[in-house]
Image (cartoon, rainbow, N blue to C red):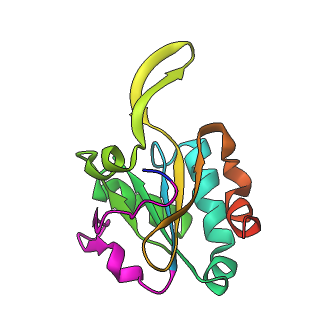
Amino acid sequence: MNIGDKAPEILGKDEKGRDIRLSDYKGRKLVLYFYPKDNTSGCTSEACSLRDHYEQLQAAGYEVVGVSKDSADSHVKFKEKHTLPFPLIADVDKTLMEAMGAWGEKTMYGKKTMGTIRTTFVINEEGIIEQIFAGKQIKTKEHALQILNQE
């Protein structure tokens, strides 16, 4: 997916098994962020940055949805442990990650593996991708401020 593309309508199921659709957010901007794994240091920092600035994000017209290949059970524990106020999609079959280009080859400690590429899509009120943050561009501890400051 690229800037200017329409995001998919069906995003997946959240940690409670509810269907999450793009149209659920019509009229609001959506921060759809993909992260590798619940309860790892970088992913926790990123989620907590979004949590800590959630009211500011909402005041600026944004909603937040996180996505990883972790199970719904893992997401429930992650949300409870860190009091995350936004839904987390359990993309266990990687359907959304692959559709959005957030699954692919990456190099970690000199080894090439397939995995989640940390990516954030900022989607406008009409469902069009306006901004993409990817890989090393994302500062996990300051990610919410990166989003807020790009307006």
Please say if 62 is above or below 66: below
Task: Kindly identify the residue that appears in the image at 61 percent across and 69 percent down.
Answer: 51
Percent of width and height locating residue 73: 30, 57
At 56% across and 48% down in the image, what residue appears?
43
Residue lying at the far front of the rendered structure? 4
Quadrant where the C terminus is found in the figure: bottom right
Give the magenta part as a residue range.
Answer: 3-28
Residue nearest the viewer, comparing 57 with 84: 57
Q: What is the x, y in percent for residue 89? A: 35, 61
Question: What residue sits 72% from the left and 59% below the top?
Answer: 146
Please give left or right for residue 27 compared with residue 72 in the image.
right
Q: Position of residue 15 (x, y in %)?
A: 32, 65
In this picture, residue 92 sits left or right of residue 37 = left
Residue at 49%, 80% in the rendered image: 125
Count of numbered labels shown in the rendering: 0
Residue 98 picture quarter:
top left
